[in-house]
């Protein structure tokens, strides 16, 4: 049975159609990478899965049912963000919020054993008692994975978890997420600008382009011909030293020339 | 009661100023007279410490100040028309809190809305006080705090507010924390982030209205921010932060009232000074801890990480 299913799914805001007619069945344990330029509706796809946004037409199913807000079947890993070092929230407190932060009341039960187990699983035991604002970006994202795993989710939704991490941490975090899905059998839907760190683990790519979408194995989708069709403008896909470089109109292709993250340019000339 | 107070006040005015700061003669008698204030102070310490934890978490210090000015305007209006001052104060702060909650979802919006509301509220308050024909001490008290007496009726009102605020915070505790420290994931987990934000503003408004009665509109921050800020300096534990914040707020509020008993100046400077001193000490302790590091970590990480990349 597929854990996540889109059937002729279309999403539009007024006249602006983000994507339309997507058919997708995600199997348990599958690693799906969602690519596409800014504004192509990658994060919106996650919001649909979370039940925060209805489809314009078509249907979406999580574990065979329509999405429900606050479902424990979904784990969510956001992008790393700057946290004030004085914020009195420790790594273990963040994980605890993942366990029962959505329940009313002050919480009577101690969850120490479960929290320790989750921190252990992501290799974050050493800094469980450190305030999150004092952790490095990579350490924070490890804790995020532990938090997302707290509800034993069937699907991990990752929304740009690599953003603002350096290259080494990007590899570390993606390796951890991959190890997690192998260990727990959870499916992964991974929204990202950075193709290369996730490429070795990706089973299928969902590419959302301005001229439509493409779904399939990375080697089938990430080709000059397919992407040129998706962008309605000439795109060249270059493979070098096991990396994929997408070269094209800078205005449309963001994952190689992202203006907000100039250090990503290093990936092209390592 | 009035006679004793008048005597204190009368003797005070002829003494040199330092004698007016501390006077522990007839302490026992005074203690009986002001037990209402002590209860009010204790209630305020509990509410201030707990609310402060969430104010820090949500970065709402400026909002507290803005709400307190509107609360002052409400109280001044009540004074002018002869209504209950506490009711006026609650009405003013609830209005401000809900406005800020509804209009200022984002931090930048919120700060500009508070900046707009605050002088407007203060200005209205000044107008109402200028029109009010009664005693000057009443007027001054709303801004900078009472001298001593809090009557039984007012203590009862404050007790009701305390029950509502503390009960509300306990009920909302976990989702409110989730929405405050981790709004993105909280949203993904179905926590009603926006609704909680407005609910908290209402509780905050009630707490502010309560604090205005004791320390005055200008000094509300000393009990709603300083104790929680001090607590977060020395610990990050979700249990110890609220416990210490309440202890610090109690020591400031009740201690301040006890010190101020025989004096003929308002109690607020005692409260603000105690809470400030606690903060300074807590900051020193926190700095020492930051230098030492929060936990001992293994130092072999760089080697291990090098291995992953290969």
Image: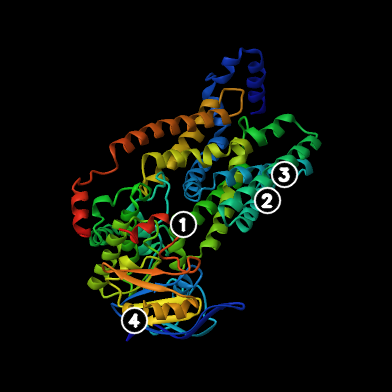
Q: Are marks 2 and 3 on the same chain?
A: yes
Q: Spatial distance from mark 4 to mark 2, Cα to Cα?
A: 65 Å
Q: Are marks 2 and 1 on the same chain?
A: no
Would you say residue A194 is visible in this rendering? yes
Q: Nearer the viewer, residue B246 or A233?
A: A233
Secondary structure at badge 1 equals loop
Quadrant for residue B181, please give it. Answer: bottom left
Q: Chain of mark 3?
A: B
Q: Residue at x 38, y 55 (%)?
A: A263
Q: Position of residue B123 (x, y in %)?
A: 74, 40
Point out which mark residue A260 bears: 1
Q: Is residue A67 visible?
A: no
Q: Nearer the viewer, residue A41 or A48?
A: A41
Query: In the rendered image, which residue does mark 4 sit on?
Result: A220
Q: Residues within 10 Å of mark 3 (few under 14, many from 20)?
A: some
* For marks 2 and 3 on the same chain, the one whose residue lies earlier in the sequence: 2
Give the residue drawn at x 66%, y 13%: B14
Quarter of the picture containing the N terminus of chain B is: top right
């Amino acid at each position: 049975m597929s854990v996540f299913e889109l059937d002729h799914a279309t999403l539009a805001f007024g006249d602006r159609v983000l994507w339309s007619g997507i058919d997708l069945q995600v199997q348990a344990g599958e690693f799906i990478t969602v690519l596409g330029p800014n504004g192509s509706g990658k994060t919106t796809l996650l919001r649909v899965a979370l039940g925060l946004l209805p489809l314009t037409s078509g249907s979406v199913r999580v574990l065979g049912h329509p999405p429900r807000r606050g479902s424990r079947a979904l784990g969510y890993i956001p992008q790393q963000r700057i946290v004030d070092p004085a914020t009195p929230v420790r790594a273990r407190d963040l994980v605890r919020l993942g366990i029962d932060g959505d329940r009313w009341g002050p919480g009577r039960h101690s969850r120490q054993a479960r929290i320790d187990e989750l921190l252990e699983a992501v290799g974050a035991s050493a800094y469980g008692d450190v305030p999150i604002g004092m952790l490095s970006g990579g350490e924070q994202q490890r804790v995020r994975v532990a938090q997302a795993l707290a509800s034993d989710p069937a699907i991990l939704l990752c929304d740009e978890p690599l953003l603002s991490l350096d290259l080494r941490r990007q590899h570390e975090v993606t390796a951890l997420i991959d190890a997690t899905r192998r260990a727990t059998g959870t499916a992964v839907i991974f929204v990202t600008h950075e193709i290369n760190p996730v490429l070795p683990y990706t089973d299928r790519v969902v590419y959302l382009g301005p001229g439509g979408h493409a779904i399939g194995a990375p080697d089938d989708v990430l080709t000059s011909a397919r992407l040129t069709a998706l962008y309605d403008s000439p795109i060249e896909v270059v493979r070098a030293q096991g990396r994929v470089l997408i070269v094209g109109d800078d205005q449309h292709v963001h994952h190689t020339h992202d203006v907000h993250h100039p250090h990503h340019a290093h990936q092209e000339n390592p | 009661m009035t006679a004793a107070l008048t005597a204190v006040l009368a003797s005070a005015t002829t003494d040199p100023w330092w004698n007016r700061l501390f006077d522990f003669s007839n302490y026992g008698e005074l203690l009986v007279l002001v037990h209402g204030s002590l209860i009010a102070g204790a209630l305020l310490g509990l509410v201030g410490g707990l609310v402060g934890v969430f104010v820090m978490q949500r970065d709402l210090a400026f909002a507290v100040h803005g709400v307190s000015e509107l609360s002052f305007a409400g109280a001044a209006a009540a004074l002018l028309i002869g209504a209950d001052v506490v009711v006026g104060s609650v009405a003013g702060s609830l209005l401000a809190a809900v406005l800020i909650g509804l209009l200022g979802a984002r931090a930048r919006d919120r700060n500009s809305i508070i900046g707009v509301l605050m002088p407007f509220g203060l200005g209205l308050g000044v107008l109402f006080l200028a029109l009010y024909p009664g005693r000057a001490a009443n007027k001054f008290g709303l801004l900078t705090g009472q001298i001593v007496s809090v009557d039984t009726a007012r203590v009862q009102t404050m007790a009701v507010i305390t029950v509502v605020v503390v009960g509300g915070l306990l009920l909302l505790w976990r989702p409110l924390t989730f929405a405050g420290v981790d709004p993105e994931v909280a949203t993904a987990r179905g926590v009603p982030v926006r609704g909680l934000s407005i609910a908290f503003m209402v509780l905050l408004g009630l707490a502010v209205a309560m604090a205005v009665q004791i320390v005055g509109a200008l000094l509300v921050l000393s009990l709603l921010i300083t104790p929680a800020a001090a607590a977060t300096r020395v610990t990050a534990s979700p249990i110890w932060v609220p416990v210490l914040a309440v202890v610090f707020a109690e020591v400031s509020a009740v201690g301040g009232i006890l010190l101020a008993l025989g004096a003929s100046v308002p109690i607020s400077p005692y409260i603000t000074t105690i809470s400030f001193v606690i903060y300074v000490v807590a900051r020193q302790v926190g700095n020492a801890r930051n230098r030492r590091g929060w936990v001992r970590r293994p130092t072999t990480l760089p080697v291990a990480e090098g291995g992953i990349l290969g």
